[in-house]
Image: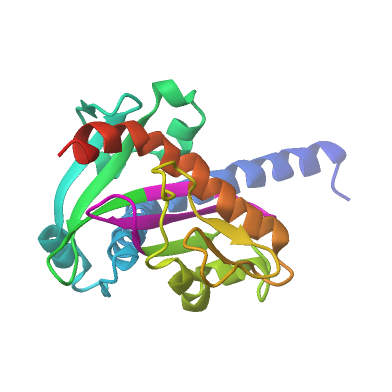
Amino acid sequence: MYSNRYIFIYASVMVVVVAVVLSTIATLLKPMQDANIKMEKIQSILASFHIESTQDNAFELFENHIKHQYIVNYEGSYEKGNAFDVDLRVELRKPIEERQMPLFEVSDLNNRKNYVIPLYGGGLWGPIWGYMALKEDFKTINGVIFDHQGETPGLGAEISTPVFEKQFKDKRIFDKNHNFVSVKVVKGGADKDDPHAVDGISGGTITSDGVSDMLKNNIRFYLNFYEQNILTK
C-alpha cells in the first residue's frame, strides 16, 4: 500500500508537470490567438461601414479603406501612437478627461469619408462591444457592428444580428438643435419616425439598455474632436 507521503509527492509532481505543459501550450498558441484577435478586429471595423471581407483579403481591404488612424484626447487634440493597438477596456476605466481613444478615418464603398468609433460596454452576462461608422458630417450613422461575450441566444445575443444592426443606418446622434442625444434602443419598439431610436430586443431589456449606454458613453468622448476638427470646417 502506498504511503501518504508517496501519494502527496506524486500528486505534487503531476500538478507541476500539467502546469508546465499547459503553460507551454498557451505560450505556443499565443501568436495564433493574437493573430485571430487582430483579424477579427480588422473585419469588424470593415463591416461597420459595409465592407465584407474574408481572412484572405481583410488586410488588403483594411489598407485600402483606412485612410488615417488617430488617437485623440478629451480636448479633441491628436496624440501620438497607434490607434489600432489602443486597449479600449483600459482607457474606459480612466476618468474621461484622461482617456486617449482611437478613431479611424475611412473610405466607404462609395469612396465617401466615414469616421469609425470603437465601442465597449456591458450587457446582461458580460461585456458587449462593437464599431460605429459615422458619415462625414459626424452626425449620421452609416453602419454598426456589435458583438458580445455571453448574451443569451435568441435574446440579448440578437444585438449581433443583421436585423438589429441594420436599424441604426441613417439614425442621427444630434437633434435638430445640434444637441448630442445619441441613439437609444427602445423597449417595446421605437417610433418609426424617430431618428434617434431603434427597436429593442424582445426579452433582452438589460442588453438593449447596455447598448444604449455603450453608445452614449463612448460617442460623447468625441464631441470635442467633432467641434474642433469637423464642425468648424
Foreground pick, 67 / 39: 67
Tell me where residue 23 appears, x and y as whole percent.
49, 45
State the predominant SS element of the stretch in magenta. Answer: strand
**Residue drawn 30% across the image and 52% down it:** 116
**Residue drawn 55% across the image and 60% down it:** 148
Tell me where residue 169 appears, x and y as whole percent.
39, 68
Image-quadrant location for residue 186:
bottom right
Scheme of colours in the image: rainbow
- Left or right of 192, for residue 218: left
Foreground pick, 194 / 57: 194
Q: Outermost residue toward the front? A: 177
Image-quadrant location for residue 29:
bottom left
Q: Outermost residue toward the right? A: 1
Foreground pick, 225 / 159: 225
Instruction: Give the total of numbered labels.
Output: 0
Which quadrant holds the C terminus? top left
Q: Which residues are magenta?
A: 118-142
Q: Vertically, is 95 above or below 229? A: above
Foreground pick, 54 / 73: 73
- Left or right of 186, for residue 163: left
Residue 150 seen in the figure:
no
Image-quadrant location for residue 171:
bottom left
Tell me where residue 212 appears, x and y as whole percent.
57, 52
- Left or right of 207, for residue 85: left
- Left or right of 215, for residue 82: left
Residue 20 shown in magenta: no
